[in-house]
Image (cartoon, rainbow, N blue to C red):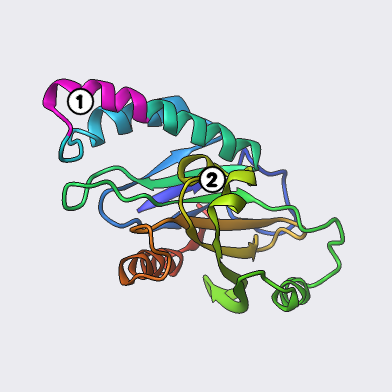
Amino acid sequence: MSTSDLEQQQPPFEGTAPRGYELVLPPGWVRIPLRQGTKEALEKVLFSHMGQVPEGIPRDDAMRFRLDMRRQLEKQARAARRNGGLDLYLPVLPRGGIFLMASFIVAEMPIGPDHAVPPQAVIAQLANEEVRGGTAAKVEVAGAPALRRAYRSTSDEESRSSTPEALQQATLPTRRVEYVLPVVNAPGHWISINFSTPGDGDPDSEFTGVLVELFDAVVGTFKWSFE
């Protein structure tokens, strides 16, 4: 289970606001905190979790592979932090000899300063907005109203984007899924959970679809932490 602390990332709220959130991660996935402890988390990932390397890379090149991976992850983490990111999640162990190209980010999301507007109304408005090449729907996350948007991005769109996934996957079309949800008992505060993967290079393949389903299942474990 992955937990993230929100206490030092948001101002005090009226009522009982959560101190953080929890997620159940699939085997081989890790959390990289983006506000504190990023360097230490990357060190642990690269020199503990990534004891294996993809097939085809000679043993003598394993350290070079890890250093290259470190530079990519540091770049991805910096970009995510600039975009309001709280935590970056990604797979660090190979499956079938290959590393999955996928990641998701939990980020602060400014919706607007009007705290009087009920979250349900904001979600309804967002659900009615057109999603180019995709869909938007009202869902529930942790027993509360939320929004789920899903769409495909072309390589050209990805290369123009400032998101961290674009930095890693700019040459491939990607499947993207975004959840938007209000922070409970914290008027005006929202977070987003953003997933991106090129899958196996075909955004419509069964393999890519399985990765999207895996992400949806992870979001299904989301809950607020009050302790």
Give neighbour class at mark 2: few <14, some 14-19, many 20+ (Cα, 10 Å): many
Q: Could you tell me residue 217's position as x and y percent?
A: 39, 69
Q: Specify the amino acid type for callout 1.
A: Ala
Q: 98 or 216: nearer the eye?
A: 98
Q: Disc 2 designates what residue?
A: 166
Magenta part, dominant SS? helix
Left or right side of 110 for 17: left
Q: Nearer the viewer, residue 1 or 226?
A: 1
Mark 1: few, some, or many residues within 10 Å (few <14, many ≥20)? some
Q: Quadrant of residue 85?
A: top right
Q: Residue furthest left?
A: 59
| Location of residue 125 in the rendering, given as x and y in whole percent from the top left corner | 77, 75
In the picture, measured across the screen, residue 114 lies left or right of residue 136, that is right
**Regarding mark 2 in the picture, which secondary structure is present there?**
helix
* Span highlighted in magenta in the image: 57-69
172 horizontally vs 55: left or right: right
Circle 1: element type: helix
